[in-house]
Image (spheres, helix red, strand yellow):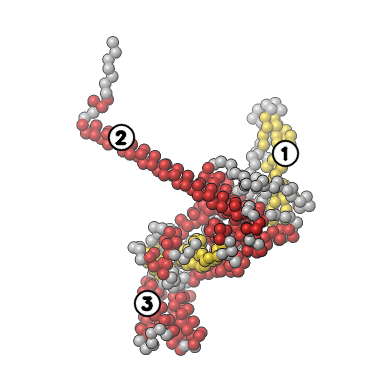
């Protein structure tokens, strides 16, 4: 006769039983929360896939539509480049989301042409670490696999021949071969050096792909614009984690610069029509140790874009007087630092237009403040603050009193009144730098970082799409940050693109320009 098993809960006192029940309830709650998070992520993933699928369908209709619907000339070439790159980027994003092989384009893609035999070849051998089999016998080389990639050194095209020897053990009938090196574009034609060259030429030298195509032809190799556009699109997606990490790093600093500059954008669904979009730029304070800049492309100048980028960041924000920043600086923990260069510019314009003696006097006062800043540049924050308090603050106080006195003597609405009002209404923000040695006097540091974009507009004419604008902002963030750290952008991007396929995402910060070290041979 079997005895019934006793319930272990019967031996627990009331307090222990309640504690056990609370523990079980907590475990169940945690499991439910985990399930909810997973369901939310799955829904987000499904929504993203649906959006990308719709977007790529629209772009493919434009790219492969009737020729009568296409745009001709230079404008058409630039738009075609952007659309082709966007399609490649979306295919790469879908591949990462679904973990399935990328779907082929609607039309059959041409087979890769053999690289010209007259191009010089450089052989790169990949062999097993040991030619001895596990059984102890010597492996026999029975053949090899060869993969050719097009490389480019400015003015000279060459071919990398990656040779992977095949080694066999006759006794065990096994085959040993070094693995194929991972590449940022699977089975791609281009070496990482060529990919880096195309990116630097497009986003640093501002050469559209159709112009690069002619340069490559002079070097003896024909590369379709659509092929280069595919490279640009995929590389943009693969480099995005670095840009995201760079943003997070910049947002750890207490002093930030912010500014924006316009750029025209042409949307495929509107034909020839363009509208104004903006590239917003952010950088750590001029006196911060981190040398970096990040660009953020947005379809408008609305202040919500700055707030979305900054998120929960709190600190001192160096900006001009554009109203889009006002809601940001009105938040608790965000302090506006005015730009003295903009105040000086108002008086300079007044003096330049009317030879105003009042404007000349204001420029002399402001010039004294800048002379002190040139001395303060080499000092640490504490010494800079002390110098400003001792020498700059008395000058600023005299300037403020002088402007108040002059304002009472000039009529409202005049150019002189407007120049004075600009500084008087912003005086608190303009002079906050006097009380903090870590804060710069103006926003010129970031305006210099925006200059490459202004120069590039002459070549771009416009961005071909929202995606093209965001891709340009991302790649330019890495290129200009590399420049700030004294790096050759081509060498940096070549090394990063080589290492990315096997580099752990948990250590992505190692590849940021300010941390980057060349890979050792």
Task: Reply above or below: 215 against 320.
Answer: above
Task: Reply above or below: 399 against 224.
Answer: below
Q: Residues within 10 Å of mark 1 (few under 14, many from 20)?
A: some
Q: On the image, which quarter does residue 187 sit in?
A: top right
Mark 2 sits on what residue?
24
Nearer to the camera, 384 or 168: 168
Q: Is residue 67 left or right of residue 449?
A: right
Mark 1–mark 3 contact, CB under 8 Å?
A: no
Picture residue at 65% right of the left edge, 39% below the top = 178
Residue 152, which numbered label? none
Nearer to the camera, 347 or 137: 347
Q: Which one is in front in this view, the residue at disc 2 or the one at disc 1?
A: 2
Mark 3 sits on what residue?
425
Q: Residues within 10 Å of mark 2 (few under 14, many from 20)?
A: few
Instruction: Say which label, 2 or 1, has the lower sequence index.
Output: 2
Picture residue at 28% right of the left edge, 10% below the top = 1
CA gap, disc 2 to disc 3?
62 Å
Residue 159, x across and y down, in percent: 72, 50
Q: Residues within 10 Å of mark 3 (few under 14, many from 20)?
A: few
Q: On the image, which quarter does residue 430 sit in?
A: bottom left
Q: What residue occupies the far right of the structure in this picture?
A: 118
Q: Which one is in front in this view, the residue at disc 1 or the one at disc 3?
A: 3
CA gap, disc 2 to disc 1?
61 Å
Task: Determine the secondary structure under disc 1.
Answer: strand
Mark 1 sits on what residue?
144
User: Do we see residue 518 in this rendering?
Assistant: no
Task: Determine the secondary structure under disc 2.
Answer: helix
Instruction: Say which label, 2 or 3, has the lower sequence index.
Output: 2
Q: On the image, which quarter does residue 203 sit in?
A: bottom right
Task: Reply above or below: 159 against 257.
Answer: above
CA gap, disc 1 to disc 3?
75 Å
Residue 400, x across and y down, in percent: 37, 81
């Amino acid at each position: 006769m079997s005895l019934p098993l006793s319930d272990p809960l019967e031996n627990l006192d009331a307090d222990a039983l309640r504690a056990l029940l609370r523990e079980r309830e907590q475990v169940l709650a945690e499991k439910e929360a985990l399930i909810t998070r997973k369901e939310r992520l799955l829904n987000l993933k499904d929504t993203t896939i649906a959006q990308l699928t719709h977007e790529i369908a629209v772009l493919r209709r434009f790219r492969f539509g009737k020729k009568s619907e296409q745009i001709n000339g230079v404008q058409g070439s630039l738009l075609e480049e952007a659309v082709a790159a966007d399609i490649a980027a979306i295919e790469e994003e879908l591949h990462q989301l679904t973990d399935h092989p990328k779907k082929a384009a609607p039309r059959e893609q041409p087979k890769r042409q053999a690289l010209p035999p007259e191009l010089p070849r450089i052989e790169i051998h990949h062999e097993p670490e040991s030619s001895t089999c596990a059984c102890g016998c010597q492996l026999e080389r029975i053949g090899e696999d060869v993969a050719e990639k097009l490389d480019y050194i400015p003015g000279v095209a060459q071919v990398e021949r990656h040779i992977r020897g095949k080694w066999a053990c006759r006794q065990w009938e096994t085959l040993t071969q070094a693995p194929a090196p991972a590449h940022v574009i699977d089975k791609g034609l281009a070496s990482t050096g060529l990919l880096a060259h195309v990116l630097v030429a497009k986003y640093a030298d501002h050469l559209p792909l159709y112009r690069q195509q002619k340069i490559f032809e002079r070097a003896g190799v024909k590369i379709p614009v659509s092929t280069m556009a595919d490279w640009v699109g995929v590389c943009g997606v693969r480099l995005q984690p670095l840009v995201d990490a760079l943003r997070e790093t910049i947002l750890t600093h207490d002093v930030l610069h912010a500014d924006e500059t316009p750029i025209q954008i042409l949307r495929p669904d509107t034909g020839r029509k363009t509208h104004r979009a903006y590239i917003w730029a952010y950088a750590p304070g001029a006196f911060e140790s981190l040398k970096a800049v990040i660009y953020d492309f947005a379809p408008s100048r609305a202040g919500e874009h700055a707030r979305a980028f900054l998120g929960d960041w709190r600190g001192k924000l160096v900006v001009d007087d554009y109203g889009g920043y006002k809601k940001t600086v009105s938040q608790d923990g965000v302090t506006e630092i005015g730009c003295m260069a903009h105040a000086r510019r108002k008086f300079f314009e007044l003096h330049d237009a009317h030879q105003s003696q009042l404007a000349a006097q204001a420029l002399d006062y402001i010039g004294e403040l800048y002379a002190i800043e040139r001395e303060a540049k080499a000092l640490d924050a504490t010494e800079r603050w002390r110098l400003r308090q001792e020498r700059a603050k008395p000058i600023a106080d005299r300037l403020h009193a002088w402007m108040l006195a002059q304002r009472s003597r000039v009529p409202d609405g005049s150019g002189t009144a407007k120049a004075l009002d600009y500084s008087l209404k912003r005086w608190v923000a303009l002079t906050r730098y006097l009380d903090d040695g870590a804060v710069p006097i103006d926003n010129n540091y970031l305006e210099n970082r925006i200059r490459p974009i202004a120069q590039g507009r002459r070549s771009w004419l416009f961005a071909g799409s929202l995606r093209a604008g965001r891709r340009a902002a991302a790649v330019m963030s890495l290129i200009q940050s590399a420049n700030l750290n004294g790096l050759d952008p081509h060498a940096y991007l070549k090394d990063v693109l080589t290492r990315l396929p096997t580099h752990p995402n948990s250590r992505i910060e190692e590849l940021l320009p300010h941390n980057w070290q060349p890979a050792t041979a």
